[in-house]
Amino acid sequence: MINDNNYRLQVFKKASIARNFEEQVIANVKNKNIKIPVYVSAGQEFIASSISTICKIKKIKPLIFGQHRCHSTYLTFGGNKAKLIDELLGKKTGCTSGMGGSASIHSKAINMYGHDGLMGSNGPVGVGACYATKKPTIIFLGDAAAEEDYVLGALGWAATKKLPILIIVEDNNYSILTEKKIRRNWEMSDVAKSFNIKGFNLNDNPVNINRYSKYFFKQPCLLNINTNRIYWHAGAGKDSEKTFDRYKSEKKILGLEAKLIDNNSKKIIKKLWQKHLEK
Amino acid sequence: MAKTLREVIKETVKFHLIKKNGLVFGQCLTAVGWVGGTLPHLDEKKGLVDLSMADVANGGIVAGAALSNRRPIYVIRYQGFSWFNAPIILNYSCKSKELWGVPSPIFIRGIAMEGSIGPVAGSSHNSIYYKMPGIKIISPMTPLEYKYAYNYFMKQDDVLYVSEHRGSYDNKDELKDILPKNSDLILFPISITRFEAIKAKKILKKKGYTIGIANILWIKPFKIKKNWKKALNESKYGGMVIDDDYPEGIAESLAYKLMENTNKKVTSLGLKNKSAGFSKQTDNLPPNANEIVNNVIKFIKYKK
């Protein structure tokens, strides 16, 4: 069974790597070891962790099209941690040879394609790649990038062609500091439905996400997943100390085992960062 | 019997689909006319794919398809539609190889035409692409030039913008450089203006001027051939780059490069600095033979 405690722990394990990685990123931004703009995924990591766990269980190796805030996508789908550290340090040994930085992560090993910086361009690019290859494909968008007109055009065409594509909208409610309700009065899940795409609006509870996995890669499916960011871009600030943190919540629910996983991840990640900083 | 450029393009596209497992994308491809008779009557099963009317998204869809090694040909029916179609191609496909080591090669068929079709659909719009890295631009006007462009595309993995013009589709002839010794001036025409340059040369000969023609096929990279350089240096008055785009882009840039590499002045001629309307009175057409003649004489008199 996929929907059991074991699944939840598997997701947590991935999330703990991502969270502890991001905490190190923030620490290294503060102490100026990282000198480039970073877009951390802390707070949103249960989305990629759940989707990657489901793909692993289903033995699907999808094409992945992410954009910024995609460290957790890279890490949870099996991207090499050391190469991401090097990338953030601007080294040639980085996963994108120091060219991509935080926002444009690329990894041939996990079929993850880099992003060019035009918000949402990974929407049509992912649809095109899916059409040409017919391989299962995932596009990760933010709630603001999803508003780009070309994303909507691409969704319409994906629906017309009935592509095996999964569109994940990581909806943290903000574009920088502009709330969604100021930008629009509609939901992406409704837009998806209007295109005859299976569209759902849900939160980032891994059990919830798994409920929709039966729709993955059979036809176009869009999940608008409500989540919370812990840090602003470049670690410049926080929305609120009271922001709901799925990581803390899951850790509490899963108890001792999760605590041990968290401690272990913390040690592994810290050691890895130290090693690469000393290089 | 020699084939027209139209027939050669059609055969090339068919070859790409049938023999190379390629893809061809565009809007209204299978509509009446099949893009000026340049497409084979095939369907999506064979890789001829009609996209929706979402131009910006479509450029991105083709960029994504190009990651698959199926080397898409992308038909942009009017070059002016590149204002919407180019952004993701230029920022994703053209940078993909350099950023991530993953090529995204596309053969873009940008098709120009003009005459009472307004401010966007008319003329060439090569200059939109020109300044961006990772793209090559070629403007074939003859059957052999088109075959060369396609073969070149298949041998490398960059994005190739192929600037076509409907006015050349009936052409069967190859256009050779004419570089007489001690000419008064060398014309460097691009795209459809190459045909007008030949007419202009004849008119100017009757008026006592010796004019050379150096046909610009490759716009980017722009390589100045040795015999062009020699002819330009030996000319009395210099050269003129002629384009069917606004001159404040490619034409002036190429003129500058020619000047940098020779000791002669090179001027440029292109569309007038105005928007084209939808009638004969309000058109903004590429320089015709008479306009070229007048501008050449004006330039020579100024130089004297």
Image (tube, rainbow, N blue to C red):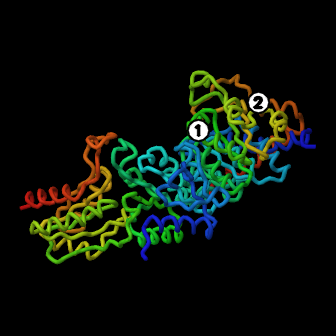
Residue A202 marker? 2
Mark 1 or 2: in front is: 2
The residue at the far right in this view is: A1
Identify the secondary structure beneath mark 2: strand
Q: Is residue B149 left or right of residue A166?
A: left
Q: Please name the residue shown 72% across and 37% down the image.
A: A197
Residue B288 marker? none
Whether the residues at callouts 1 and 2 have beta carbons within 8 Å, the answer is no
Q: Nearer the viewer, residue B251 or B47?
A: B47
Chain letter behind tag 1: A
Q: Is residue A262 left or right of residue B128?
A: right
Earlier-in-chain disc, 1 versus 2: 1
Res A229 seen here: no
The quadrant in which residue B22 appears is bottom right
Q: Characterize the local packing of mark 1: few (<14), some (14-19) or many (20 or more) Cα atoms within 10 angstroms.
A: some
Q: Nearer the viewer, residue B171 or B296?
A: B171
- Residue B141: % across, % down: 38, 65
Q: CA separation, marks 1 and 2?
A: 34 Å
Q: Characterize the local packing of mark 2: few (<14), some (14-19) or many (20 or more) Cα atoms within 10 angstroms.
A: some
Residue A30 marker? 1
Residue type for callout 1:
Lys
Residue type for callout 2:
Leu
- Residue B66: % across, % down: 59, 58
Quarter of the image with the N terminus of chain B in it: bottom left
Q: Is residue B267 left or right of residue B275?
A: left
